[in-house]
Image (tube, rainbow, N blue to C red):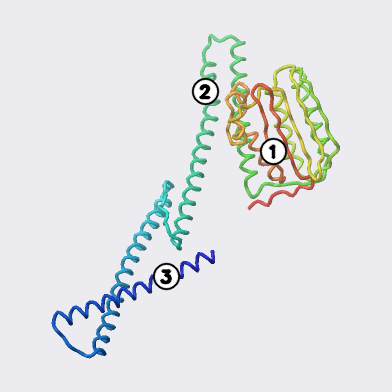
Amino acid sequence: MKVRKFFKHLFGIFAFFVMVTFSFSAAYFTVSYIYHLFDFHTSNYIHHLVTTILGFFILAGVAFSLSIIIRSRQRNLFQEVIGALRRIAQGDFNVQLEKLKKEDPFTTLIDHINHMAKQLKQMEDMRQEFISNVSHEIQSPLTSISGFARALQYDQLSQEERAHYLSIIETESKRLSKLSDNLLKLTSLESKNHPFDQKNYRLDQQIRNIILACEPQWVEKELEMDVSLEKVTFVGDEDLMNQVWTNLIHNSIKFTPSLGRIRVHLQQIDHKAIVKISDTGIGILKEDQVRIFERFFKADKARERSKGGSGLGLSIVKKIIEMHKGTIFVNSEEGRGTIFTISIPIQSHLETLR
């Protein structure tokens, strides 16, 4: 940076020298031409004095002309910048100012405006996508509820049909309620006011209790549960971490066919707890794995609508893990199963929300 500034100053000095040389050379040849044209004869002193005065006038004229050109260019840049900011203020984020070739304050300003417009556009796209996803997720159960409620008005329905329709309405209502709860949970986690209750507790016992609570589900599908849990004492929000393990284990059970196998492994490495939850389920496409933690994202095969879910569970899981300064990764192969690997510091310090 210092070398660049040095050469920049050196170039400025050289340009000024060229201007002075050009101005006084032009003055000298102009005065000589006039003297020759009108056959003037004066002393060398007068000749040099006239040349010098004319040289200063020419230099001032060149400097004035350059200043007008530079000011005009700066004025145009100011107008472009003001126009771009006005468009951004009106909600048009498709703004991309042309970058300058040289380094000056305008270059930095234009770069920052382009970056701001790009970030705002990404946020707007995410907002629009979020609204679209929420609308879609809400519309589907509402359509089912409305349709089956209308069907219940027919007197010719049998008692079994009525019970079936009512069961569907109840299921869709619960789905709406769960979607609402998850949206509120995610919003709360990302706000400044979510309560955190950190305490010392046994992480292995927590995971074991959740596996036992899910016993009816994995017994019904005759799944083999391979559980290996080292004794690990953890500092964190027990209720939030409870949601992490519940969601991941439920997903493994849900997407693993009957007679499959689920493995839950916990060990302490240095000052971190490493949890691996693997299954022999349907797996996730490679191109979907990079988006699996996005809100409302559902892999085509791994998130069938018949399986239920809103696509918010893994977003909540990732947020909670990040709050505990941990990481979560997924490794999956279609048709062969999925492995979720969670790494969290044992002495967790929850993030300070801004």
The crowding category of the residue bearing disc 1, from other C-alpha atoms within 10 Å (few below 14, some 14 to 19, many at least 20), is some
Q: Mark 2 points at which residue?
A: 146
Identify the element where label 2 is drawn: helix
The crowding category of the residue bearing disc 2, from other C-alpha atoms within 10 Å (few below 14, some 14 to 19, many at least 20), is few
Relative vertical location of residue 84 with respect to residue 307 in this rendering, above or below? below
What's the mark number on residue 38? Answer: none
Q: Is residue 153 left or right of residue 306?
A: left
The crowding category of the residue bearing disc 3, from other C-alpha atoms within 10 Å (few below 14, some 14 to 19, many at least 20), is few
Instruction: Single out the residue that lies furthest toward the right.
Output: 231
Relative vertical location of residue 99 with respect to residue 94 in this rendering, above or below? below
104 and 17: which is toward the camera:
17
How far apart, in angstroms, are the residues tagged by discs 1 and 3?
A: 55 Å
Q: Name the residue under label 1.
A: 328
Going by the numbered disc 2, the residue's amino acid type is Ser
The answer to which of marks 2 and 1 sits earlier in the sequence is 2
How far apart, in angstroms, are the residues tagged by discs 2 and 1?
A: 40 Å
Q: In this view, does 210 lie to the left or right of 111?
A: right
Q: Do the residues labelled 1 and 3 touch (CB within 8 Å)?
A: no
Going by the numbered disc 3, the residue's amino acid type is Gly
x, y (%) of residue 67?
Answer: 33, 69
Identify the element where label 1 is drawn: strand
The answer to which of marks 2 and 3 sits earlier in the sequence is 3
x, y (%) of residue 124?
Answer: 49, 43
Relative vertical location of residue 284 with respect to residue 274 in this rendering, above or below? above
Residue drawn at (53%, 66%) of the image: 3
x, y (%) of residue 217?
Answer: 74, 22
Q: In this view, does 113 lie to the left or right of 38?
A: right
